[in-house]
Image (cartoon, rainbow, N blue to C red):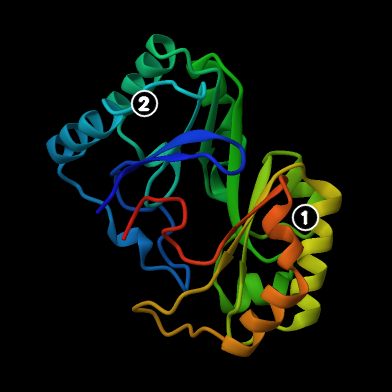
Amino acid sequence: MERYNRITNKNKREIVLLKSRPCAWGKCRFCDFIEDNTLDKNEMLTLNASVLSRVTGEFGVLEVINSGSCFELPVETLALIRTVVREKGIHRLFFEAHWMYRNRLQELRDYMGIPIVYKIGIETFDYDFREHYLNKHADFRSPEEVSRYFDSPCLMVGIKGQTREMITNDITILKEHFHLGTINIFTNNSTEVKRDPELVEWFMDKYRHLLCDPQIEVLYEKTDFGVGD
């Protein structure tokens, strides 16, 4: 599994995929990414130190992802990230956190001492689909609630059961309420959730212009950031 890459097309940054404790929620219907975790602390610390040693500070921006939320990384890894930030001249971090951690985000901002862009995987702003089918455990009702805490929502497109109207509404909300966002095209995995090829084809035709939009990153494959497998 590749765990380090340089993103050079939009929002230039280095990105690392670290290993953490299991996702605190871990019940999203569509997700098997949470399997990249461990309870072996030594394994986490050894692997994460090796990955972080590759950071050069080339762009001054670093994104840290793991199979859950940044708060599930061991404290020793968070301390090492802070050291890398200082030694490599990093001036902005990207982290991702679940809705349940929304009241703790300032903790890491204070700890790291630099601005943090917080991503959140909401998948859709449609409450019923998000909560009753995808089982996200993110019970907000409006985009204003999300923007009060988070900077960059991650949407998912191409799931059977989604509609064109849902996707159109999601992208409209994303553009109107946030400066940054990510759109993930769903890929079949080990879960029961399935990809809707016709919906994906429609999206890629109607929203092809987003590929050139500096505000939005579109991931056609889950490894398009160059990490994972």
Dot 2: few (<14), some (14–19), or many (≥20) neighbours within 10 Å?
Answer: some
Residue located at (69% from left, 39% from top): 149
Q: Position of residue 112 (x, y in %)?
A: 49, 18
Instruction: Place residue 128 in its image quadrant.
Output: bottom right
Residue located at (32% from left, 41% from top): 18
Q: Could you tell whether 1 is left or right of 23 in the image? A: left
Q: Position of residue 29 (x, y in %)?
A: 47, 74
Relative to the observer, which residue lies in front, 74 or 226? 226
Instruction: Place residue 82 in its image quadrant.
Output: top left
Relative to the observer, which residue lies in front, 216 or 65? 216
Q: Could you tell whether 115 is left or right of 81 in the image? A: right
Amino acid residing under circle 1: Leu
In this rendering, the answer to whether 143 lies above or below 106 is below
Residue on which disc 1 sits: 174
- Where residue 14 is drawn, which disc sits there? none
Q: Position of residue 198 (x, y in %)?
A: 63, 89
Which circle's residue, 1 or 2, is located before the other in the chain?
A: 2
- Whether residues under marks 1 and 2 lie with C-beta atoms below 8 angstroms apart, the answer is no
Residue on which disc 2 sits: 78
Dot 1: few (<14), some (14–19), or many (≥20) neighbours within 10 Å?
Answer: many
What kind of element bears circle 1?
A: helix
